[in-house]
Amino acid sequence: MKKSWKISIGAFVLLLLVFILPGLVTRKVSIKTVTHIRQPLTRVFVTFGDPARLREWMEGFEKIEHIYGLPFSEGSKYRLTFTVGDKKMSAVEEIIKVDWKKHLVIDVEMSRGHVYADMYFFQMDKFSEIAGTFTFTGNDPITRILLPWMKPFIQKKLEHGLDRFRVMMEKKKT
């Protein structure tokens, strides 16, 4: 009986380590995306930075409040309010870099995590491309432990949001 008890405890500790270890070793999770939009690059870039259009493609978005700086320029800050499930959340977004129609870097701070979005914009033959690298970091130990396990869910939500942006951009105005 004692031997089976020790084996059970050992297996439990091993499973716990397997679950916790990736979060302790990997402090960040990066996700790369590529989105193709059948619209001119100027229109895509301007619309992506238009706060009035966020509700059309950003799931759960409620409002944006200007905190500091010139709109859509380096150093400007905004407070975003959105709903996730039945929970209201807010985030502070800072625009780190704007290189007109080429490069946009946004830093988003939330209570439980941090997102660094580095996006490049390209004009191809008949479409525009947004190539992004999104780096997620947990602010607390529990979020850091769960982050590697949440990566597929985060990636799916991120791709869904960018797909909603693409669909919005490609809709024909009637």
Image (cartoon, rainbow, N blue to C red):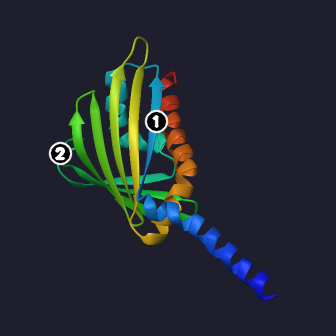
Q: Give the mark nearer the N terminus: 2 vs 1.
A: 1
Element marked by disc 1:
strand
- Residue found at x 40% / y 45%: 134
Q: Nearer the viewer, mark 2 or mark 1?
A: 1
- Determine which quarter of the picture holds residue 19: bottom right
- Determine which quarter of the picture holds residue 46: top left
- Residue found at x 37% / y 59%: 91
- Residue found at x 39% / y 49%: 135
User: Which quadrant does the N terminus fall into?
Assistant: bottom right
Q: Identify which amino acid the numbered label 2 is placed on.
A: Leu
Above/below status of 73 relative to 122: below
Mark 1 crowdedness (10 Å alpha carbons): few <14, some 14-19, many ≥20: some
- Determine which quarter of the picture holds residue 65: bottom left
- Residue 116 falls left or right of residue 159: left
Residue pushed farthest top? 125
Q: Position of residue 57 (x, y in %)?
A: 48, 40
Above/below status of 81 relative to 111: above
Q: Position of residue 88 (x, y in %)?
A: 48, 64
The residue lying toward the viewer, choosing from 77 and 29, is 29
The residue lying toward the viewer, choosing from 86 and 152, is 152
Residue pushed farthest bottom? 2
Q: Do we see residue 88 in this rendering?
A: no
Identify residue for label 1. Answer: 33
Q: Position of residue 152 (x, y in %)?
A: 57, 48
Q: Do we see residue 11 in this rendering?
A: yes
Q: Give the Cα distance between marks 2 and 1.
A: 28 Å
- Residue 160 falls left or right of residue 27: right
Above/below status of 85 relative to 34: below
Identify residue for label 2. Answer: 70
The residue lying toward the viewer, choosing from 76 and 174, is 76
